[in-house]
Amino acid sequence: MFITFEGIDFSGKSTQIKLLKDYITEKGKDVLVIREPGGGEIEEKIRNILLDKKNLEMTPETEILLFSASRAQLVRKTIIPALEKGTIVISDRFHDSTTAYQGYGRLLPLDTVLKISEFAIKGAIPDITFFIDIPVAEARKRKIEQGHDTLDRIEKMEDDFFGRVREGYLDIARKEKRFRILNGCEKKDDVHEMILKELMRTGLTNV
Ligand code: TMP
């Protein structure tokens, strides 16, 4: 089973992933949590290039190819082997991030974005995707609380960009049956309960 979490920056994905991981581990099941971009040694090197605040000259085309390069490596070396062993894989972001950020956010042509993703993921489509939705104003509030100095190259983008990314996610949610929209402004325990309920309702009772 392959579960992915999506959302604009500061949506609280990581908190929910940790709660779900602990829940599955307590049940004695094998679970692997990965993050994108990143995961393995090569992928983490690509992540550093992508998020380095000094790389302001990076073009959207370079950006999508680097995100996809990291994903191609992770899919082949980690995700597919783990799924084949029956491990439950939870990924903090996956190809929908590329559609939302590079397609809707950076305004790259969507048909090209989808083709690049298709090539990178080798058919590893998630079984279910949780989109933790928060308004851009809430993301801005959380970003200010975190402090400007710690922000990476993409977190530093302006509100308009995140507005387009959020709209992109909502658009994908309308098209993709595997998408579940959750309100990221609710209490974290309530969101967690909704995730568990949704997994049961969808028949992903293996969790
Ligand atoms: P993170 O902050 O959730 O670890 O994600 C890293 C940043 O990279 C985040 O700002 C979203 C962005 N991103 C993309 O723009 N495209 C992608 O395909 C992925 C996976 C992440």
Image (cartoon, helix red, strand yellow):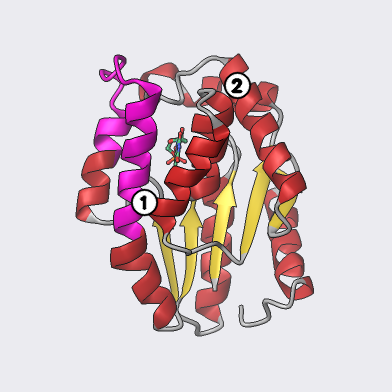
Q: Which residues are magenta?
A: 47-74
x then y, percent, for residue 118:
47, 52
Q: Is residue 183 left or right of residue 143?
A: right
At horizontal 48% and vertical 52% (from top left) the residue drawn is 92
Q: Is residue 180 left or right of residue 53?
A: right
Q: Earlier in the sequence, mark 1 or mark 2?
A: 1
Secondary element under disc 2, as helix, strand or loop, is helix
Q: Which mark is residue 71?
A: 1
Q: Quadrant of ligand 1?
A: top left
x then y, percent, for residue 167:
69, 30
At horizontal 48% and vertical 45% (from top left) the residue drawn is 115
Q: Which quarter of the figure is the C terminus placed in?
A: bottom right
Q: Which mark is residue 140?
A: 2
Q: Is residue 52 magenta?
A: yes
At horizontal 34% and vertical 37% (from top left) the residue drawn is 65
Q: Is mark 1 within 8 Å of ligand 1?
A: yes
At horizontal 66% and vertical 24% (from top left) the residue drawn is 136
Rendered image quadrant of residue 40: bottom left
Rendered image quadrant of residue 122: bottom left
Measure how far apart labels 1 and 2 are at the Cα level: 28 Å
Mark 2 crowd level (few <14, some 14–19, many ≥20, 10 Å Cα): some
